[in-house]
Amino acid sequence: MKIFARAPVRIDFGGGTTDIFPVSKKIGGAVLNAAINHYVDGSLIKLPNKTKLEYHSNLPTSSGLGTSGAMNVVWLALTTRFIDKRDLAEWSYKIENATMVVGGKQDQYAAVLGGINFLKFDNHNSVKIEKIKLTDSFLKKFEDRLFLDYIGPRFSSDINSVIVNNFTKGKKKTVEAFKEIKSNTKKMRDALVKKDLDHFACLLNKEWELRKSLHSKVTTKEVDARIKFAMDNGAIGAKVCGAGGGGSILFYAENKKEIMKKFKNKLIPFKFDNEGLKVWKR
């Protein structure tokens, strides 16, 4: 018997790191993200004397798109009998957390749910899910203005560790930045629901400015140069996905195709995924 599983990775628009428990425990967390059509694919093949488990992704190393969270989701989906997607997301988070990786829950929830989600985290580490429902025509318009530029490997757990440690110590600059990031993410959610993409792009930029204030290594000279290049050529919004320091830059631009032609870097084309985790037998 063969069992197959597929889970999407995600882009995060705002609120990343507020889903990490020391932060959400104190001030609550809010994340706005979207699953995209790049996947972790896995298979489990039961043979007479052994079981063969495989999974892989077509994304480059450390893309900042939540691949490790999606991998844990696929692994659990193949090897357990979880039916409820929330339970699957929670256990996938617990497995990653047990390996001493400093991270939150947004990647796992994006992988199981699909679509665009506004996730709220309370001081008990529980998650409230709000599916952002938009018309097909608006989704396509939104999708057609977004693109990803892959920068190169980054080590988000290292950056997150320092940032969370500063927050736990009560460093005023870090605490206030997280409060603003949370507030800004709620505004992003509102702008998207109201279909105000110009305002959404401005809030995307604000998210990036706030995130850079958390740690000097969130950005690099190369990241700054690529964002400036895109902005000079017509982009109006940009932020690095994940914790920063590398990975992928998410751009918002009305003239997306023209800008993409000028990039000589490794771009990652994508569309939104609305299905989330899929498991089937053959």
Image (cartoon, rainbow, N blue to C red):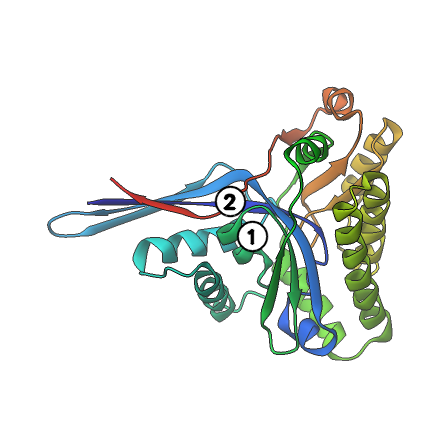
Task: Please name whichever residue, 83 or 246, is drawn nearer the observer in this view of the structure.
Answer: 83
In terms of image quadrants, where is residue 232?
Answer: top right
**Residue at figure coordinates x 73%, y 67% from the top left:** 163
Type of amino acid under label 2: Pro
Reading the image, the residue beneath label 1 is 110
Type of amino acid under label 1: Ala
**Residue at figure coordinates x 49%, y 43% from the top left:** 275
Residue 76 in the image: state x and y as whole percent: 37, 58
Q: Counting residues from the N terminus, which is met first, the one under dot 1 or under dot 2?
A: 2
**Residue at figure coordinates x 48%, y 69% from the top left:** 94
> Could one spot residue 85 in this view of the protein?
yes
Q: Secondary structure at mark 1?
A: helix
Where is 266 relative to 224, above or below?
Answer: above
In the displayed structure, does residue 216 sit left or right of residue 107?
right
Residue 62 in the image: state x and y as whole percent: 58, 47
Sort mark 2 into few (<14), some (14-19) or many (20+) by Cα contacts within 10 Å.
many
Task: Please name whichever residue, 230 or 161, is drawn nearer the observer in this view of the structure.
Answer: 230
Reading the image, the residue beneath label 2 is 8
